[in-house]
Image (cartoon, grey):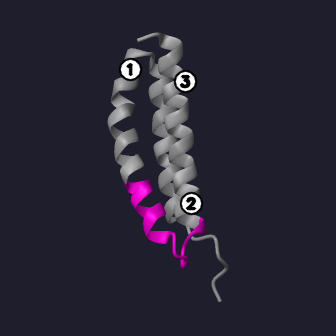
Amino acid sequence: MDPLMAIGLLAAAQVVGLLSAAGARFSAGSRGQTFFQRLFMAWFAVLGMITPGAFIIGPGYVLACGTSLAVMLLAATWDVRVAT
């Protein structure tokens, strides 16, 4: 596979993952909540499998994938609402 195409696919996978985390966070209480939660869990698993394979491209890409996983997890679980 062409390295440039692999980099583009990794970047696209990370963007979709971060968008799924945002969707899971902001759809809480709505009709789309179940869909976004399932999308998040599926994409989290996909990125988890892709991350070790990013060593083929280079060690910096593994760091980027791992960071995306951490940000996805934080975005989906951190409750930013003010406690009353």
Q: Is residue 38 magenta?
A: yes
In the picture, residue 55 is in which quadrant? top left
Instruction: Assign a secondary structure to mark 3.
Output: helix
Left or right of residue 18: residue 48: left
Which quadrant holds the N terminus?
top left
Task: Identify the mark at residue 8; answer none if there is no mark.
Answer: 3
Rendered image: mark on residue 29: none
| Amino acid type assigned to the residue bearing label 3 in the image | Gly
User: Three-letter amino acid code at disc 2?
Assistant: Gly
Report the residue marked by disc 1: 55
Magenta region, residue range: 26-41
- Farthest-out residue, bottom: 84
Q: CA distance from mark 2 to mark 1?
A: 29 Å
Gap in angstroms between the C-alphas marked 3 and 2: 22 Å
Residue 23 has which mark?
2
Looking at the picture, tell me which residue is in the foreground, 61 or 39.
39
How busy is the neighbourhood of tag 3: few (under 14 within 10 Å), some, or many (20 plus)?
few
Marked residue nearer the N-terminal end (3 or 2): 3
Q: Which numbered disc, 2 or 1, marks the residue closer to the eye?
A: 2
In x, y percent, where is residue 70? 48, 47
Please say if 12 is above or below 19.
Answer: above
Graded by Cα atoms within 10 Å as few (under 14), some (14 to 19) or many (20 or more), the crowding at tag 2 reads many
Q: Quadrant of residue 79?
A: bottom right
Marks 3/2 in contact by CB < 8 Å: the verdict is no
**Which of marks 1 and 3 precedes in the sequence?**
3
**Is 50 placed left or right of 76 in the picture?**
left
